[in-house]
Image (cartoon, rainbow, N blue to C red):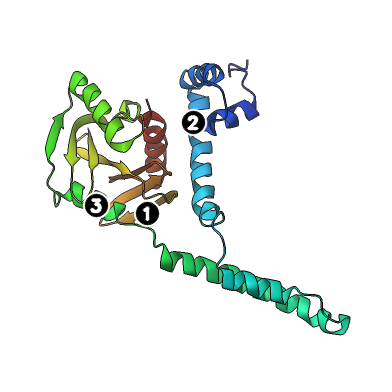
């Protein structure tokens, strides 16, 4: 018997993309939160969306430098047919070079800040000194959610990772090098950290090993999140999805 709630695929995508009105969003959200299959499916769609934005979203809305626009216009002016047969291939190659050059120019002029990973690992290693340490008491953590919401300009809270055996043991608050929060979780003596701060504006999703840790960065245009711990790729993927979906109020 099929026990999955009747939600159209397009409604699920509209929910993830923030295209529903308040009533419909609340209805879909309640169904998704009550169903493990849909929660996992929504998390996977969000991960796919973050990857696509990270790969293809940057720079496409920014104008090309005027010199390159002039070059394209010059290359596309009408010419005698005899010259066009060889010119079409040359034009295609020049456009590829122009676009590649534009990406290189954008990175040079607007370099992305990738130090969020370094900051997160420094915080985990104790190289950064927190301005305060919040105990993992329900009332205190609930109050801290308001502080994080104000600091990050996003409605966030400490995700519940108990489904994977992790419990919140404390929150470290940092003011240097920027306002940030490190949520520390424990399971059988292992520590999993979730570092939060305002996004640099560059969407990014990545997972890799660094300094003996499995590290995952999940950043949209509002919040940057770096997760670190000793675990497998698959376990980090599940933790990252659970953390990302459980982060918002």
The N terminus is located in which quarter?
top right
Secondary element under disc 1, as helix, strand or loop, is strand
Of mark 2 and mark 3, the one earlier in the sequence is 2
Residue contact between numbered discs 2 and 1, judged by CB atoms under 8 Å: no
Which one is nearer the viewer's eye here, 212 or 6?
A: 6
- C-alpha separation, residue under disc 1 versus residue under disc 3: 16 Å
- The answer to whether the residues at label 1 and label 3 have Cβ atoms under 8 Å apart is no
> Circle 1 sits on which residue?
208
Question: Which residue: 17% across, 50% down?
Answer: 125
First in sequence: mark 1 vs mark 3? 3
Residue labelled with disc 3: 119
Disc with the residue nearer the chain's start (2 vs 1): 2
Checking the image for residue 40, the label placed there is 2
In this view, which residue lies farthest toward the right? 81
Mark 3 crowd level (few <14, some 14–19, many ≥20, 10 Å Cα):
some
Callouts 2 and 3 close, C-beta under 8 Å: no
Quarter of the image containing the C terminus?
top left
Residue 103, disc: none
Q: Nearer the viewer, residue 83 or 66?
A: 66
Q: Is residue 106 left or right of residue 175?
A: right
Q: CA distance from mark 2 to mark 3?
A: 29 Å
For label 1, count other residues whose C-alpha is less than 10 Å away and answer few (under 14), some (14-19) or many (20+): few
Position of residue 11 measured from the top left corner of the image (x, y, whole percent): 61, 26
Where is residue 184? Give x, y as percent.
22, 36
Q: Secondary structure at mark 2?
A: helix
Place of residue 209 in the rendered image (x, y in percent of width and height, measured from the top left): 33, 55
State how far apart marks 2 and 1 are (Cα).
22 Å
Circle 2 or circle 3, nearest the eye: 3
CA neighbours of label 2 inside 10 A, class few (<14), some (14 to 19), many (20+): some
Q: Residue at x 53, y 37 (%)?
A: 45
Above or below: residue 171 compared with residue 91: above
Q: Position of residue 116 (x, y in %)?
A: 30, 52
């Amino acid at each position: 018997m099929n026990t999955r709630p009747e939600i159209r695929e397009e409604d699920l995508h509209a929910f993830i993309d923030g295209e529903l009105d308040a009533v419909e969003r609340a209805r879909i959200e309640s169904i998704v939160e009550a169903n493990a299959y849909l929660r996992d499916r929504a998390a996977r769609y969000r991960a796919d969306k973050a990857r696509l934005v990270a790969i293809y979203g940057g720079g496409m809305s920014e104008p090309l430098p005027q010199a390159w626009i002039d070059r394209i216009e010059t290359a596309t002016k009408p010419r005698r047919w005899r010259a066009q047969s060889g010119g079409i291939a040359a034009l295609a190659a020049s456009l590829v070079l122009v676009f590649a050059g534009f990406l290189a120019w954008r990175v040079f002029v607007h370099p992305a800040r990738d130090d969020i990973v370094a900051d997160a690992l420094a915080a985990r290693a104790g190289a950064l000194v927190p301005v305060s340490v919040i105990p993992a008491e329900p009332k205190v953590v609930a109050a801290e959610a308001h502080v994080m919401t104000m600091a990050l300009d996003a409605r966030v809270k400490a995700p519940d990772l108990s489904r994977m055996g992790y419990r919140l043991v404390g929150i470290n608050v940092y003011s240097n090098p920027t306002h940030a929060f490190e949520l520390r979780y424990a399971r059988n003596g292992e520590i999993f950290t979730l570092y939060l701060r305002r996004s640099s504006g560059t969407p990014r999703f990545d997972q890799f090993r660094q300094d003996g840790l499995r590290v995952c960065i999940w950043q949209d245009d509002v919040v940057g999140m770096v997760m670190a711990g000793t675990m497998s790729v698959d376990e980090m993927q599940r933790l990252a999805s659970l953390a990302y979906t459980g982060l918002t109020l």
